[in-house]
Image (cartoon, rainbow, N blue to C red):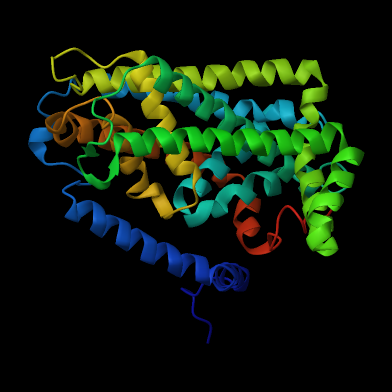
Amino acid sequence: MLDSNAPPPRARATGQGFLRRHAVKLVASVVITAALLYTLKKAGLQLWPPREAFDDVRWWTVPAYLGSFVFVNYFRASRWRFLVRSFADVPLRKILTASWVGFAAILMFPFRMGEVVRPYMIREKGKVSLTRATGSVVGERVVDGLYLTLMLAVALVVVPTRNPVDQRIPGLPTVTVAYVRHASFLMLGVFAAAFTTIFVFYFARGWAERMTHRTIGVVSTRLADKLASTAIKLGEGLHFLGRPKDAVPFMAETTAYWVLNALGMWFLAWGCGVVHADGTAITFGEACALMGTLGVTILIPGPPFLLGTFQAGIIAGMGMYFPEHILQGPGIAFASLLFATQFLWISVTGGLSLIGNPTAIHALDEQPRDSIAAATD
């Protein structure tokens, strides 16, 4: 006799396939999350602060920030169409729904495993290959990383931080102001190098392949072939740069996305009572720095729901400008409300978009093991 409560065979297969394929990553994420939460708690940094931390919050600024984040999330999703349309005609509605489902998957799954969902949802045999769709996402990520770390570097140069720079950041006992500054400039170098590499492989492929074989090939010809092949595929993500009608609006919407994001964070931080030791309010330049440290932190693959990493990124940035009592009060309240608001909206848009797009569920089970090197149409 059949069990009416049992899930359909396809659903069971999908879930089992996903768990089997990513078992090591899932177990590692649990271990990392537990270790991170324990470390933060031992250092006195709470993921959800005590009630008194919210005493200075102007609560009307929270829904106002949510309203601004609606536009931030729209530009984050819609600009992808300019990368995609350089090789395929995909309707904006499909771009938005695929993006919103993908953003929710990135948020909820560990190690950024949700990145594959977006390209998988727009693939279409004979029209949109998974390789090109994935390449466009990689291109977007590299541009974002370069844009974000450049904003962060400018803020660190222009806006003075607390002195001395060797003082430790409350809640992050092993991190100093100098460490945050050095790590930020290092990440700028990493993204600049990544962008330059795929840029060269796209616009000067022959020369780049020859140089790879003359250098890496001395050690291993097979490794040189692999690196060159991967870089060429990643370089396809910059195809839009050769088309001003795509490159200009993409950069315009990317600028709108990041500037609105910084303005919203600045506004919410003010609404939470984040001030300096002398009582002056947070500045826009400091908000840009906070956005940069947060963005760099969560770009690194980590635990599901960004647990701990989100708050650590905000606190690391705030520690460069604000005293301990602000970090432990209004500062952690700001980080918590920022996280809760973003989590709410990304979950809502992702869930509503998923209702009419069951292909996103299959993406978890049917995705290639290496969505860049192995993806073929």
Residue 206 in picture, x, y percent from top left: 92, 40
Residue under the point 65% across and 56% down: 363
Determine the image quadrant of residue 141: top right
Residue under the point 22% across and 14% down: 281
Relative vertical location of residue 277 with respect to residue 170 in this rendering, above or below: above
Asked whether residue 309 appears in the rendered view, the answer is: yes
Residue 124 in picture, x, y percent from top left: 80, 46
Determine the image quadrant of residue 91: top right
Asked whether residue 344 appears in the rendered view, the answer is: no
Residue 75 in picture, x, y percent from top left: 56, 23
Residue under the point 70% across and 28% down: 81
Residue 71 in picture, x, y percent from top left: 48, 21
Residue under the point 56% across and 18% down: 255
The residue sitting at the bottom extreme is: 1
Instruction: Report the front residue among 277 and 268.
Output: 277
Image position of 118 (left or right of 170): right
The mark total stands at 0
Instruction: Report the front residue among 374 and 176.
Output: 176
Determine the image quadrant of residue 67: top left
Instruction: Report the front residue among 66 and 169.
Output: 169
